[in-house]
Image (cartoon, rainbow, N blue to C red):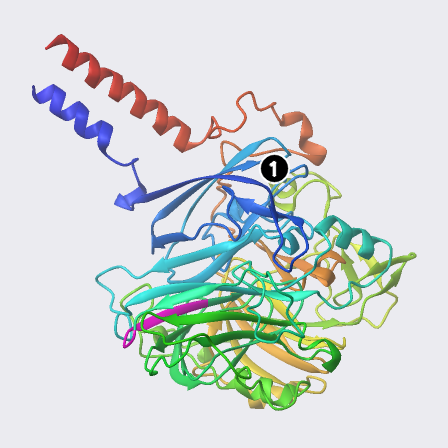
């Protein structure tokens, strides 16, 4: 009997975890599903038939295992926007770190959400796939022993806002390949759905919209992610204040906003109290910023906030956006107002502000200048410091590990060279545990959002004009918020500081899908000279110059045989059989 009890306990227990940290398992099939969010039938990318995909709801330090089965007709990668992948660049899911999962294959991501809390999202990083969907939320909760710096909310609501095209991602790619810019989107979605018919002359009948059900008097945490292609959006809820409490893993100084500009790839969470009399439902709005006035109405997403005691449908005009559609001054001042809560604890018990970033000596400075898309060798391309990045057939991390020559160069310039633009695979050579200052100079005509994988960086300054060394006198060296995606306004600059303590090769990209596709990205190589471990996953896919190392997957649509998950499943099955056999013997 003791043997039977032991076997049953072992069979029922979760998989072994490093240092006792729990595992969370997810099994996804990524496929096309039919949808018509703006009334036009099209194929979108869903996960397990859902669009948007399911939320990963985990707790800091948990190990996350996601088996991705690629049922698309193209190679696929999933990246985890804002998850730092400590020492596991192999799991980052971008073309510089991973061979894409071939159509009909599966691959198992295994990573730890180490020392992080907050609101993030995942999406397909393969070219233009996010324009078709495939995105979902990542919520990383605090451990019970670490208090959150506000009252625990009564509910948690995730919203995905983003511009949307009725053309599929393949058509959008073809347009860019042919030298044509994408033009204005066809609408704005909220949670994959079109706008409520707030105006019959703007919104056609039959559009399915999002309805958010709430209880009067309750306070909800709204996690809002801009997952769109290229458009900055202003978010607001009619007659309700938005108390900003967190952005991309950092608790912020708490202040109320009536509306907030959320740029492509950014995530925010607000506390919203249901303190109205519910005489009607209320509008939830995400409207385009900095676009031509003729298309603003079309580029307005509208959902409905429905109190359980609501007395009627929403009516009347939408809540007002900022006064001037083109007013970047309003937006830049709003961005400057977002500060780090230096007294709150994040994933660890020590206050966020105990890391005094303003006292650290900068070791490397990179001024990255962007320009409008331009022709290079007859092809439309986007650049940073006159270099348009082209992904090699062999991912950078694999090429580094196997010493494959000629894949990339460690010669990316630290300032604009004022030379003819070129296409190249040139990357930044960072210094491990160095402190890098990066200035984004936007000489293009649209707002750009930049994201750095592997890290959270400190936003220390932004202003109009050309950055100079004298601009450092305006830096915020005390409570600049730490995050992973930041906006840069046209004709302006934004400066960040980042501590390069996470070894790997990390993607620094513009989040705007069109210019990202056209080459506006670079990678930062960070090598720990005292650690030669490579952490190559057992189930690594090989491609490019290393294709000969790849074995055909004999079991498609199952957990990768080399993965720890597959091994644990085998162990579980054996234990279960042994337990059953013991019962039979008795």
Which residue occupies the foreground of this view, 583 or 574?
583
Which residue lies most toward the right here? 378
Outermost residue to the left = 1
Residue 68 vertical placement versus 341 (above, below) = above
Q: Residue furthest top?
A: 585
Query: Could you tell me which quadrant the C terminus lies in?
Result: top left
Residue 510 location, x and y as percent? 66, 64
Q: Position of residue 230 (x, y in %)?
A: 67, 66
Main SS of the magenta part reads: strand
Q: Position of residue 509 (x, y in %)?
A: 64, 61
Q: Residue at x 16, y 13 (%)?
A: 582
Q: Quadrant of residue 262?
A: bottom right
| Magenta stretch encompasses residue 114 | no
Q: Could you tell me if residue 360 is visible in this image? A: no
Question: Does residue 218 sit above or below 347 in this rendering?
Answer: below
| Crowdedness near tag 1: few (<14), some (14–19) or many (≥20) residues, C-alpha within 10 Å | many
* Left/right of residue 318 with respect to residue 429 in the rendered view: left
Mark 1, secondary structure of its residue: loop
In magenta, the rendered stretch is 216-223
Query: Residue visible at 52% across and 59% down?
Result: 432
The image shows residue 322 at horizontal and vertical percentages of 58, 87
Q: Is residue 219 magenta?
A: yes
Residue identified by numbered label 1: 101
Number of on-image labels: 1
Quadrant of the image containing the N terminus? top left
386 relative to 536 in the view: left or right: right
Residue 452 vs residue 177: left or right? Answer: left
Which of the two residues, 513 or 562, is positioned nearer the viewer here?
A: 513
**Observer-nearest of 553 and 466:** 553
* Above or below, 455 relative to 366: above
Q: Does residue 283 appear in this view?
A: yes
Residue drawn at the location 69% of the way across and 50% of the way down: 127
């Amino acid at each position: 009997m003791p043997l039977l009890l032991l076997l049953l306990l072992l069979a029922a227990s979760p998989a072994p975890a490093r240092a006792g940290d729990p595992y969370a398992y997810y099994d996804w099939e990524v496929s096309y599903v039919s949808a018509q969010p703006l009334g036009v039938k099209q194929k979108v990318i869903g996960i397990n038939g859902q669009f948007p995909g399911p939320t990963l709801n985990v707790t800091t330090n948990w190990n996350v295992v996601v088996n991705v089965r690629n049922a698309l007709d193209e190679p696929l990668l999933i990246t985890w926007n804002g998850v730092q992948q400590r020492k596991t660049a192999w799991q980052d899911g971008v073309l510089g770190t991973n061979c894409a999962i071939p159509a009909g294959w599966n691959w198992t991501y295994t990573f730890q959400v180490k020392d992080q809390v907050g609101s993030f999202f995942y999406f397909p990083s393969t070219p233009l796939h996010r324009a078709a969907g495939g995105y979902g939320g990542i919520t990383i909760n605090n451990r019970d022993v670490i208090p959150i710096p506000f009252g625990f909310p009564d509910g948690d609501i995730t919203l995905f806002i983003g511009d949307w095209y009725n053309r599929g991602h393949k058509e959008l790619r073809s347009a860019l390949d042919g030298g044509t810019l994408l033009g204005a989107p066809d609408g704005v979605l909220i949670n994959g759905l079109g706008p409520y018919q707030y105006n019959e002359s703007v919104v056609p009948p039959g559009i399915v919209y999002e309805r958010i059900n709430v209880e009067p008097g309750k306070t909800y945490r709204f996690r809002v992610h801009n997952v769109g292609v290229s458009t900055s959006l202003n978010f607001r809820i009619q007659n309700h204040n938005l108390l900003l409490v967190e952005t991309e893993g950092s608790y912020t100084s708490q202040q109320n906003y009536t509306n907030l500009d959320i740029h492509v790839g950014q995530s925010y969470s607000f506390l919203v109290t249901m303190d109205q009399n519910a005489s009607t439902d209320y509008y939830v709005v995400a409207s385009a910023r900095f676009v031509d006035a003729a298309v603003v109405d079309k580029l307005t997403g509208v959902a409905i906030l429905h109190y359980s005691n609501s007395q009627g449908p929403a009516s009347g005009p939408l809540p007002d956006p900022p006064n001037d559609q083109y007013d970047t001054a309003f937006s830049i001042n709003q961005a400057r107002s977002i500060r780090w809560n230096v007294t709150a604890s994040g994933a660890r018990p020590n206050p966020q502000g105990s890391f005094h970033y303003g006292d650290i000596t900068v070791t490397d400075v990179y001024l990255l200048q962007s320009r409008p898309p331009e022709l290079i060798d007859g092809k439309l391309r986007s650049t940073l410091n006159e270099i348009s990045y082209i992904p090699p057939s062999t991912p950078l991390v694999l090429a580094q590990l196997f010493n494959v020559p000629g894949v990339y160069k460690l010669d990316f310039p630290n300032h604009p060279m004022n030379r003819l633009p070129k296409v190249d695979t040139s990357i930044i050579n960072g210094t491990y545990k160095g402190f890098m200052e990066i200035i984004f100079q936007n000489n293009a005509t649209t707002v750009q959002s930049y994201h750095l994988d592997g890290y959270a960086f400190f936003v220390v300054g932004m202003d109009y004009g050309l950055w100079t060394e004298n601009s450092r006198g305006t830096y915020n060296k005390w409570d600049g918020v730490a995050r992973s995606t930041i906006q840069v306004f046209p004709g302006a600059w934004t400066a960040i500081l980042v501590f390069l303590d996470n070894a790997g090769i990390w993607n620094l990209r513009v989040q705007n899908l069109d210019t990202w596709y056209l080459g506006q990205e670079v990678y930062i190589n960070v090598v720990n000279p005292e650690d030669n471990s490579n952490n190559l996953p057992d189930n690594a896919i090989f491609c490019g110059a290393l294709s000969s190392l790849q074995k055909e997957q004999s079991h498609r649509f199952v957990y990768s045989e080399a993965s720890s998950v597959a091994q644990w499943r085998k162990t579980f099955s054996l234990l279960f059989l042994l337990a059953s056999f013991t019962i039979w013997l008795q």
